[in-house]
Amino acid sequence: SRRSGGRPMKQRLLVVANRLPVSAVRRGEDSWSLEISAGGLVSALLGVKDVDAKWIGWAGVSVPDEVGQRALTKALAEKRCIPVFLDEEIVHQYYNGYCNNILWPLFHYLGLPQEDRLATTRSFQSQFDAYKRANQMFADVVNQHYQEGDVVWCHDYHLMFLPKCLKEYNSKMKVGWFLHTPFPSSEIHRTLPSRSELLRSVLAADLVGFHTYDYARHFVSACTRILGLEGTPEGVEDQGRLTRVAAFPIGIDSDRFKRALELPAVKEHINELTHRFAGRKDCEYLMMIIVILSETLSSKVMLGVDRLDMIKGIPQKILAFEKFLEENPSWRDKVVLLQIAVPTRTDVPEYQKLTSQVHEIVGRINGRFGTLTAVPIHHLDRSLDFHALCALYAVTDVALVTSLRDGMNLVSYEFVACQGSKKGVLILSEFAGAAQSLGAGALLVNPWNITEVAASIGYALNMSPDEREKRHRHNYAHVTTHTAQDWAETFVSELNDTVVEAQLRTRQ
Ligand code: G6P
């Protein structure tokens, strides 16, 4: 930390992400109510040691008038948040379009949009232009708040154009960029019409981070193969300037889960879930689950918790569960799959299609294997509050994380953190970043291979207590020692060092 007039001063960190960690609801012309999401990532980013962090991003609402904008800015300032105002048209083109219809599927190996290729090609350019305009708007806000000595940490695929915009404002600004999704093989990235421009703008950053070594390697290969630059063990070099590229696997705030499990209310939830006691009414969703689980005495609980996103492999997971029931009639009334599917990006047509597809499959399987009193799959299109989720993780026997691709997948970490006493089994996709850290404790599967996933379900349900204990111990040790806080601190400290190194080089 720096000193000014003998007084220690904390270093300022500007965290820039598409979305602020708040949900803002307008109550009147100049009044807003804000709810800050208390997730582990938020506390990690806003709580880096000896750092004074502020968060810059879109508040997720359209605020066309100045009165509303001023009031929201003031309310957010108390939460250390600074808004970027995006109008509906730009949100449509930048967020629904370029980010979530083009980059998101491509980075998860689902390719560029297939249907009506010509229309896509025509709208591609306008969506990319909107993406650049939006990134420039983020840069303007960062620049207004930037003070000499600040470090700026940009997050995710929404803001790949931001490092370049920031360096154009001020080449001395320390800029880091971190990708929360996979970075695909260069053979996939090279299909993107704006492939070079995006790589070049990311390379303007001083430090570029990914969840796994593979993603970092893919990025370096894309820079060497598409841009013809030189890859080194430290990163990518362009005319003597090094952009450091490295892996920084994220974690969770495992203590937050452990603390939650000790709360009397959560203990009571766990008790209720375990003993079929359904006499209280303090959590609507939880009550629903209690009723669901109480229908099937002595059944095993399998759990999926995902955003309702095509990368999560929800249809494949449900089909694998169907195959398991088909092949194992004796389990039919002894196991229930509870799938929490949190609605997301509901304005993007692909997501709307997925919702009806999942409903159709669930309905068909429940029709096929349900009885008058019970159904095998309980699918909820909603999120759960944090305490209900912890209780549910704690009573689950087998968690199913079968993403087709996933940057890291922290649901797998959260499940492990809550399984201290039960020692349930994690079935985990080999295409989730988490497979690299939890692979030794989980049952790894190829989520596209429904036969293999069905067999793993059987193996998990029949696993001996000894094997469960051994597998759990491995994963628990990892999850509790590689936290979100460590991740954030390592990245920020490395970002500082990188810049110092660069300055040293120029001085030599
Ligand atoms: C992924 C992305 C995040 C994003 C989140 C929720 O985890 O990496 O950047 O915030 O999904 O998606 P949403 O579109 O609702 O912000």
Image (tube, rainbow, N blue to C red):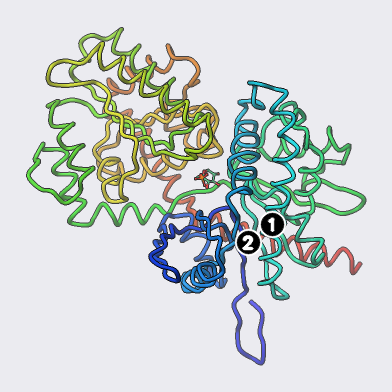
* Amino acid residing under circle 1: Gly
Q: Among all residues in the image, which is located at the extreme bottom? A: 5
Residue 57 position in % (x across, y down): 58, 59
The residue indicated by pointer 2 is: 492
Q: Tell me the tag on residue 479.
A: none
Query: Quick one: 417 or 392, which is closer to the camera?
Result: 392
x and y, in percent, of residue 287 in the image: 17, 42
Whole-percent x, y for residue 334 in the image? 19, 20
Residue at 61 percent across and 89 percent down: it is 7
In the image, is the residue at mark 2 within 8 Å of ligand 1 by its beta carbon?
A: no
- Label 2: element kind: helix
* Residue under the image location 27 percent in, 51 percent down: 387
In the image, taking residue 440 as reference, residue 258 lies left or right, namely: left
Residue ID for mark 1: 176
The image quadrant where one finds the C terminus is bottom right
Few, some or many C-alpha atoms within 10 Å of disc 1 (few <14, some 14-19, many ≥20)?
many
Q: Secondary structure at mark 1?
A: strand
Mark 2 is on which residue type?
A: Val
